[in-house]
Image (cartoon, rainbow, N blue to C red):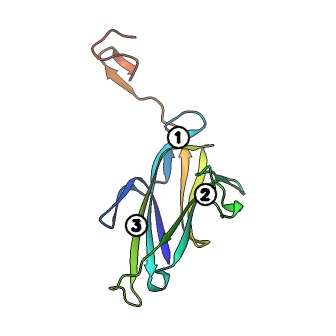
Amino acid sequence: MDAKLLLCDFAEVSGGKLFVSGAGLALLASATPAQPYRVNLSLAILGLINLSDTDAQHKMTIELVYVTGRNETRVPLADELPEGNDPADRGMFIAYFVAPRSPQMLPGDEWSMPMAIPMFGLGLPDLGPYYFSVRVDGREMDRASFRLMPPPPPQVADLPGGPGVAQGDQLLGGPPL
């Protein structure tokens, strides 16, 4: 079994296919100027299933890690730990799945199992480098890194009130604020 992970603006699964928009994010700008820094992203995961991986339960974990120098800190993605799980998994997204064996599957075949996980409004504790890690049955399958940047400065535009008026400083069609 293997899995590939992409960070993207949006992902969804339809008809057994993975649809991805804005893939390959490496730099993310926060939508908020202070902690928690909010971001909108989706994880697009393509699981690759072999014949020997079918008809058995598997445990997938997704971990978000903040990197500072040589230290790595898990950023909680979940508040609760499913019953019977290892306390070391606290804060990870955990999913159990069974890939059913298809009668058309032959030895040597590798079938895909697409997954899309939206994380809109995800709060991050600090600016800087992060990575998502996807594990299946305890083995890391893939990792996707990104760096969180501060929000961009407000854009300045020439609006009816004159040059250099920041957007939002004046109501269109109304008096200057």
Residue 63 position, x and y percent, is 59, 59
User: Residue 114 — which label?
Assistant: 3
Q: Position of residue 123 (x, y in %)?
A: 56, 43
Q: Position of residue 74 (x, y in %)?
A: 66, 54
| Residue position for label 1 | 38
Q: Secondary structure at mark 2?
A: loop
Q: Is residue 7 above or below residue 40?
A: below
The residue depicted at 41 percent of the width and 71 percent of the height is 113
Residue under the image location 63 percent in, 43 percent down = 125
Secondary element type, mark 1: strand
- Which quadrant of the structure image shows residue 34? top right
> Would you identify the image quadrant in which residue 67 lies?
bottom right
Residue 109 versus residue 5 in the image, above or below: below
Which numbered disc flags the more N-terminal residue, 2 or 1? 1
Looking at the rendered structure, the kind of residue marked 1 is Arg
Marks 2 and 3, Cα distance to the nearest angstrom?
20 Å
Q: 27 above or below 87? A: above
Residue found at the far top of this picture: 175
Front of the two marks 1 and 3:
3
SS of the residue at dot 3?
Answer: strand
User: Of residues 164 and 87, which is closer to you in this image?
Assistant: 87
Q: Residue furthest bottom?
A: 107
Residue 137, given in percent of the width and then of the height, sits at 59, 73
Q: Calculate the distance from the C-alpha at mark 1 to the C-alpha at mark 3.
A: 26 Å
| Mark 2–mark 1 distance (CA, rounded to whole Å) | 18 Å
- From the image, tell me which residue sits under label 2: 92
| Residue displayed at 60% across by 47% down | 128
Residue type highlighted by circle 2: Met
